[in-house]
Amino acid sequence: MKIKSCGQRLDFLRKKLWAGDQQAMAKDLGVSQATISRVTRDERSLPLKLLQTVARDTQINLRWLLIGKGEPFLPQDHAEHGPVLPVVERPLPGPPDEHFLEIKGVYPVARGQFGAGRYWLCVTDRLVKEFRLKKVLAGDRILIDTAAASLAGPAAIFVVIPTATSKPRIQEKRSTPQRKHGSGRNLRGVRLRGLSQASGGKDVSNTSQSPDNEFPQVVGVAVLLERSFGEV
């Protein structure tokens, strides 16, 4: 079924599943009626909370809802269990709900790792080559946290914006810290968070000093690395 926009596809579902009742749809999907109204008029993007509810509790094909591919509904024997987070193929400059157009789908996450400001970054060959990555491989998934409280902590892989006009990039090591003349004390640097490993990945933890405005702006830190295959 070819329907041009996310808003139009959501409106199709409103008529098909909720008999046109916008209030009932909003209640079932955990958002306000005003949000449903704005989305169906293409005045705003689909909120992350709605996408998570759709993926967890309904037979709606999230891929169809997001990009119009496939059929509107999943087979009756299909069932998703547990929380999910958005999947992207490029590092984001902020929380995923502020960059909806970059979302390619969703992927399950353990309940203890779930967070509203988190997303899965799917590592591609292009990313590995572009950012000269050594600790991750094409096919890996990195769980990125954009919450302000996490950005101040240590990390081993993180997303930064080098300058105000540049795009986000992935770094695996901290920027070289500035040192006070005649002293061994670090004045500036960026923190790296040790990764919890999934699927047998090796430890890539590291630490350093607090961030400073003269260094790239940290907009995301990795909290989990999921390998695409076996032990490495």
Image: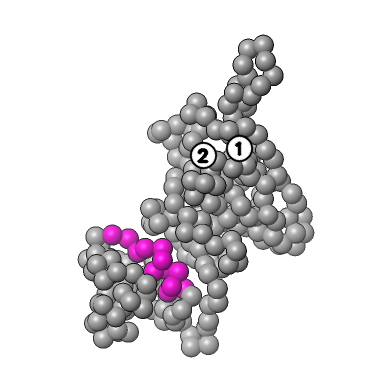
- Label 2 close to label 1 by CB (< 8 Å): yes
Q: In this figure, which residue is indicated by the disc labeled 2? A: 218
Question: x%, y% of residue 116?
Answer: 47, 59
Quadrant position of the C terminus in the picture: bottom right
Residue 170 seen in render:
no
Above or below, 121 relative to 175: below
**Residue visible at 51% across and 33% down in the picture:** 216
**Residue visible at 32% across and 60% down in the picture:** 45
Q: Amino acid at mark 1?
A: Arg
User: Quick one: 45 or 147, which is closer to the camera?
Assistant: 147
Query: The magenta stretch spans which residues?
Result: 44-55
**Residue visible at 58% across and 55% down in the picture:** 143
Query: Mark 2, residues whose alpha carbon is within 10 Å: few (<14), some, or many (≥20)?
Result: many
Quadrant position of the N terminus in the picture: bottom left
> What secondary structure is the magenta-colored segment mainly?
helix
Residue 73 as seen in the image, left or right of residue 123: left
Q: In this figure, which residue is indicated by the disc labeled 1? A: 191
Above or below, 214 relative to 69: above
In the rendered image, residue 45 lying in the magenta stretch gets the answer: yes
**Residue visible at 67% across and 50% down in the picture:** 195
Above or below, 203 relative to 217: below
- Total numbered circles: 2
Question: x%, y% of residue 119?
Answer: 51, 57
Residue 21 seen in render:
yes
Q: Quadrant of residue 17?
A: bottom left
Q: How is the image coloured?
A: one colour
Question: x%, y% of residue 79?
Answer: 53, 81
